[in-house]
């Protein structure tokens, strides 16, 4: 019996917000790549995020290594979006003003 060699697509899906997720989980490509860059093995990634399958983590790391330039562009875009959303939220909900209001309310009690 001959072994059938079949190329399988990376277990990555883009959700409706444009965020790439691994397998059928809510764990993002960003998360897996960040933990991998910190030196974690695929087994350690699965230990930290038990909803992931080991094979999916290996496939995701392989995808990252084979498409590093494109993934890095995507990750930079995600970081920029994150900064923009954070700035927008801080403008709408001033954290310093909230702290001051909470302290004032506590002082009234």
Image (tube, rainbow, N blue to C red):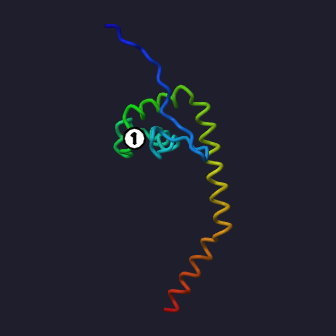
Q: Position of residue 94 (x, y in %)?
A: 64, 71
Residue at horizontal 42 percent and vertical 14 percent from the top:
5
Residue at horizontal 50 percent and vertical 44 percent from the top:
28
Query: Which residue lies most toward the left here?
Result: 1
Q: Is residue 93 left or right of residue 37?
A: right
What residue does disc 1 label?
A: 52
Whether 68 is drawn above or below 106: the answer is above
Q: Position of residue 95 (x, y in %)?
A: 60, 71
Q: Which element type, helix, strand or loop, lies under badge 1? A: loop
For the N terminus, the image quarter is top left
Q: Quadrant of residue 24?
A: top left
The number of discs equals 1
Q: Is residue 45 left or right of residue 86?
A: left
Q: Quadrant of residue 42?
A: top left
Q: Position of residue 18 (x, y in %)?
A: 61, 44
Q: Quadrant of residue 35?
A: top left
Q: Residues within 10 Å of mark 1 (few under 14, many from 20)?
A: some
**Residue nearest the viewer, comparing 97 with 22:** 22
Residue at horizontal 65 percent and vertical 43 percent from the top:
77
Query: Which residue lies most toward the top here?
Result: 1
């Amino acid at each position: 019996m001959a072994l059938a060699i079949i190329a399988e697509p990376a277990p990555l899906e883009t959700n409706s917000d444009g965020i790439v997720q691994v397998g059928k989980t809510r764990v993002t490509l960003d998360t897996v790549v960040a933990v991998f860059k910190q030196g974690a093995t695929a087994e350690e990634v699965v230990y930290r995020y038990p909803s992931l399958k080991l094979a999916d983590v290996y496939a995701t790391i392989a995808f990252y290594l084979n498409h590093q330039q494109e993934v890095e562009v995507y990750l930079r875009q995600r970081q920029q979006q994150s900064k923009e959303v954070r700035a927008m939220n801080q403008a709408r909900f001033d954290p310093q003003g909230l702290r001051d209001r909470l302290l004032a309310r506590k002082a009234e009690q």
